[in-house]
Amino acid sequence: MTTYIVTFDVKDKTRLSKLKGVLKDYKFFCPIHENAWAIRVEKKSSEIRDELMKHTTAEDRLFVIRTGTEAAWKNSYGEKNDEWLKKYL
């Protein structure tokens, strides 16, 4: 499995809620902050982007990147998320 960071800028609250629901469907997910999540899947970044684009419009922004070998952060969403990020990033 590969870990990806997905960032998004979705103005409409309904579309934003739907997009977050789709991210949760990936099973292995971790919110980093309100508009950035980490997910683990066996897909390419373009496949993830294409799946998520179905729940956005032309005015929304979406970015999917495979994680690398180093990461640093401050104030994750609690100990559970902190441990997830340490393990998979």
Image (cartoon, rainbow, N blue to C red):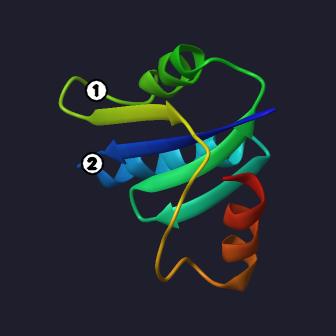
The amino acid type of the residue labelled 2 equals: Asp
In whole angstroms, how far apart are the C-alphas of marks 1 and 2? 10 Å
Q: Residue at x 41, y 64 (%)?
A: 34
**Considering depth in this image, is 8 or 89 the residue closer to the camera?**
89
Residue 12 disc label: 2
Residue 57 in the image, given as x and y percentages of width and height: 28, 26
Residue 77 in the image, given as x and y percentages of width and height: 57, 78
**Considering depth in this image, is 23 or 71 the residue closer to the camera?**
71
**Which quadrant: the N terminus?**
top right
Number of numbered callouts drawn = 2
Q: Residue at x 66, y 53 (%)?
A: 89
* Disc on the earlier residue, 1 or 2: 2
The amino acid type of the residue labelled 1 equals: Thr
Q: Is residue 62 at least partly visible in the picture?
A: yes
Left or right of residue 48: residue 81: right
Location of mark 1 (residue): 57
SS class, disc 2: loop
Does residue 66 sit above or below 10 in this rendering? above
Residue 6 in the image, given as x and y percentages of width and height: 48, 42
Left or right of residue 43: residue 75: left
SS class, disc 1: loop
Q: Is residue 15 at least partly visible in the picture?
A: no
Crowding at dot 1, Cα within 10 Å, few <14 / some 14-19 / many 20+, comes out as: few
In this view, which residue lies farthest toward the left? 59
Residue 51 in the image, given as x and y percentages of width and height: 55, 21
Q: Are marks 1 and 2 in contact (CB under 8 Å)?
A: yes
